[in-house]
Amino acid sequence: MALDLLMHMPTATIDRRRRVSVIDATLNQTVTLDLHIDRHQPSPPGKAQAPYRVHAHDDTGDIQLVYFRVQGDWLTKLLPVGERRLVSGDIGIFNGEKQIMHPDYVAAPDDPDALPSVEPVYPLTHGLKSKALYKLVQQVVTQLPDLTEWMPKATREHHRWPTFAEAMRHVHQPEDPSDAELWGPARNRLAYDEYLAGQLALLIVRATMGSTRGVARQATGHITERLEAALPFSLTDGQKHALADIHADLASENRMSRLLQGDVGSGKTVVALMAMAHVAETGAQSALMAPTEILAAQHFRTLKPLCDAVGLDIALLTGKMTAKERRSIAASIADGSIAIAVGTHALFQNDIAFKDLGLTVVDEQHRFGVHQRLALSDKGKHSDLLVMTATPIPRTLVLTHFGDMEVSTLRDKPKGRQPIDTAVLSIGEYDRVLNRLQARLAEGAQAYWVCPLVEESETLETMSAEERFGHLQKVFGDSVGLVHGRMAASAKQTVMDRFKSGEIKLLAATTVIEVGVDVPNASIIIIEHAERFGLSQLHQLRGRVGRGSTRSACLMLYEEPLSETAKARLETIRQTEDGFEIAERDLELRGQGDLLGTRQSGMPGYRLAVPDVHRHLLEWAHQDAIEILSRNPGLTGTEGEAVRTLLYLFRKDLAIPLLRAG
């Protein structure tokens, strides 16, 4: 509880040092006045809802202090008639006269310490009063001892930062508003500490994974060579480099823990398949785990023809299978006859036992935190771990969320991929868009029309997919299809198959098409109400086209008026197709929690560090964490104890039992 209070950062400060006269106090200002109390005007009898007014003045004018629901005589004691009082609060006006409603503080002139000169303002939950929280935080900060310094001396001297305890006092007991500013020395120091604790924990986990003995796998190449020859395209340089990294990891006696990140269409699945084939050459099995059954099934459909071509047995295991099907597949996994098992988390339930699990591949990595990564790879006692994400992740988030892993990045797209012409238009151009679309579909093109909602909403004035489908049907007839997330999987698949075969020319859809839909002939995507989508989502949606040999187009339609953030998003998408550049911009516009869905996934968020402001501190914390652990891997002695204290303070102490001496 005390630690939680200490880590609860103020979001602003109120400067109560500003002493003004009544005549100079302006509307909506927080001021402190030196007043003479004239008279009390209690609520009339039987009218408890009416305000209780206290009339007061200074040399420049009159003012009223207004209270509601007053019981007892505490106000007459707080504001005695004929005496002076310091009163602090927000200035309002009623019937032409200045007033302060429910003053924040009232103090006698000879007791100014009863009124904080600079007061921190904290975010509150329902039922929690600001004054009560302020008092509790003050008690904790007052009792905070000076702790042994864990920060490298050179870092502290370079930045001229206060100690941890001093920084906490500056933030929670500011003498000047600048003491608590986000970019001030105190908050910078605390943000660095939070980053340092996070980096230490991730590096300790990485050291544990790396020090756990794996199996040095010596592959023959007899499957991977045939598999590469069977691919309908050549591997990109990025894919070759990633595979070289993976092969080196697999040949090492230490367990692999690698993140494979790539932009839309960069070919991560092929890299994963080549890695699994490499493991199969050594006689071991692989598991490919996807976050949803739809994605698992899609991976299976993509990989099976290639596996069949080279004689690799592959199976799909999902939670919806019959007990008989599940038992049959489980038996084949247990006896080792299945080389690659594809599925959801069902693959790692207790009734599934691999004969020799050599490699675990996890798709859409950001849904899984550090502890899940450790648990997943424990299914095979010495198995290697490869995790993939289609969300290009900025460097800062790679460090904060995946610092326990080595990273391979696919930046180049497969050969033959066409650039996508991107345009931004007002919804007022709808008729012109429709005419142009008619012409393109008549030439044989196919298109997506994406809407943010499934059905009409009473609260949002936004076109839904069902509504737009109805409008488009009037123009295009039976050549329009509809797909959204509330449809049954089989109905959805039927529509997608018809679109893939060319029977449907135009597909009205929600963001259900965002991930994994691959129709090479679809060369146009229209995103309606584009201002309602995040940057990463717009980028993923645009990636549904540009997959064939035809030059593709993405048209983003927006509704006026546009916010500055929405304008910045649309302009970024218009200017670049580089997913990594887009991810960096998204981080600036949205913040790291939204970008990876970390607020829902239990991944680390920050309480003291604000990534937009403190991002530059992360690299320093990362380097310092490396130096601390290379100098003192067991965190022993005085320095080690100080660093352990840091880990406890930021609740990273789960990493401490993983420490190894030497």
Image (cartoon, rainbow, N blue to C red):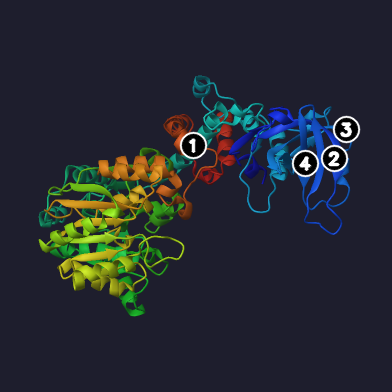
- Assign a secondary structure to mark 3: loop
Q: Kindly identify which residue carries mark 4.
A: 65
> Which numbered disc flags the more N-terminal residue, 4 or 2?
4
Q: Can you tell which of label 4 and label 1 is closer to the viewer?
A: 4
Q: Can you tell which of label 4 and label 2 is closer to the viewer?
A: 4
- In the displayed structure, 484 sits above or below 8; it is below
How crowded is the residue under tag 1: few (<14 C-alpha within 10 Å), some, or many (20+)?
A: many
- Assign a secondary structure to mark 4: strand
- In the displayed structure, 354 sits above or below 576; it is below
Spatial CA distance of label 3 from label 4 is 15 Å
Q: Check if mark 3's residue and mark 4's residue have beta carbons within 8 Å.
A: no
Q: Quadrant of residue 222?
A: bottom left
Three-letter code, disc 4: Leu
Q: Kindly identify which residue carries mark 3.
A: 83
> Which numbered disc flags the more N-terminal residue, 4 or 1?
4
Q: Which mark is residue 152?
A: none
> Which numbered disc flags the more N-terminal residue, 3 or 2?
2
Residue 188, given in percent of the width and then of the height, sits at 52, 30
* Residue ID at (46%, 50%): 603
Spatial CA distance of label 3 from label 1 is 52 Å
Relative to the observer, which residue lies in front, 509 or 335?
509
Q: Which mark is residue 78?
A: 2
Q: Kindly identify which residue carries mark 1.
A: 195
Three-letter code, disc 3: Glu
Residue 600, given in percent of the width and then of the height, sits at 47, 55
In the image, farthest residue toward the front: 96
How crowded is the residue under tag 3: few (<14 C-alpha within 10 Å), some, or many (20+)?
A: few
Three-letter code, disc 1: Tyr
Spatial CA distance of label 1 from label 2 is 46 Å
Q: Can you tell which of label 3 and label 1 is closer to the viewer?
A: 3
